Amino acid sequence: MKQMREELIRSIVMVFRKRELPKDGPIFMSSSFEVDMQTIEHLAHQTQWQNFPHDVIRENPLALAFMTPKAFAWLLPAYLNTSVTLYSETDTLTTSIITCLTPPDEADARQFETLSEETRTLDAGLLEEDLTNSLGADDELLQLFIDRASLLTQDEKAAVRDYLQYIDVSYGEDFPAFGPKQALDRYWATGDFEKRGRSL
């Protein structure tokens, strides 16, 4: 497993090596109190993704979710490598990455609706508002996924697929309901990314 991990890290570094952050434009699309955006923006303009501090990545597992497509494509490899290198120390980092790499579909909406109904049955006051449409095949989330994925080269997409396969093989049991398998099945498993992108 160690050799597989080291090969994956080398592959990610190699295929993303030329990826640069555009000088103009924002890093984040929206703000979140859960992300130290000021530190990330400061570091983003001072370093390459290869040198982005692992501790900042570990402390900001949700940052990718709030990034613009260009910033996402730039910092994604640093997040992938941190996830692979420090998996046991990253808590929710890998789950956050997988969520960003999984296009939404109707099954998500149905699963969330079932969960909402079960929760209401257990405690009617727990869900005060109707949340059934807040997750699932949301058009904006799907468009954001497409915008982000379309910026990646074919080799970068293959590296993302390899990352997801590695996480699935090595830690798949950590994701019983939603994980790398869903991301692979919905988009990344095939090498024909252009065809898959059009079918989303």
Image (cartoon, rainbow, N blue to C red):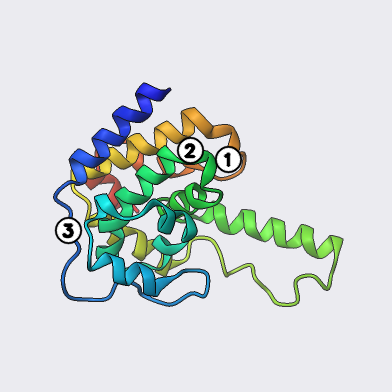
Q: Is residue 35 left or right of residue 53?
A: right
Q: Residue at x 17, y 67 (%)?
A: 22
Instruction: Name the residue that disc number 3 marks.
Output: 20
What kind of element bears circle 1? loop
Where 98 sits versus 140, above or below? above
Q: Front-most of 164 and 33?
A: 33
The amino acid pointed to by label 2 is Lys
Q: Front-most of 22 and 143?
A: 22
Q: Residue at x 41, y 59 (%)?
A: 56
Q: Residue at x 47, y 66 (%)?
A: 138
The quadrant of the image that shows the C terminus is bottom left
Instruction: Name the residue that disc number 2 marks.
Output: 181
How many numbered callouts? 3
Looking at the image, tell me whether mark 1 or mark 2 is earlier in sequence order: 1
The amino acid pointed to by label 3 is Glu
Q: Is residue 191 visible?
A: no
Mark nearest the camera among 1 and 3 is: 3
Q: Is residue 151 left or right of residue 181?
A: left
What kind of element bears circle 3? loop
Residues at circles 1 and 3 in contact by the CB criterion of under 8 Å: no
Instruction: Name the residue that disc number 1 marks.
Output: 175
Q: Within the image, what quadrant is residue 11 found in? A: top left
Mark nearest the camera among 1 and 2 is: 1
Q: Residue at x 54, y 33 (%)?
A: 172
Q: Residues within 10 Å of mark 1 (few under 14, many from 20)?
A: few
Distance Cα–Cα, label 1 vs label 2: 9 Å
Q: Within the image, what quadrant is residue 142 found in? A: bottom left
Q: Picture coordinates of residue 70 (x, y %)?
A: 24, 64
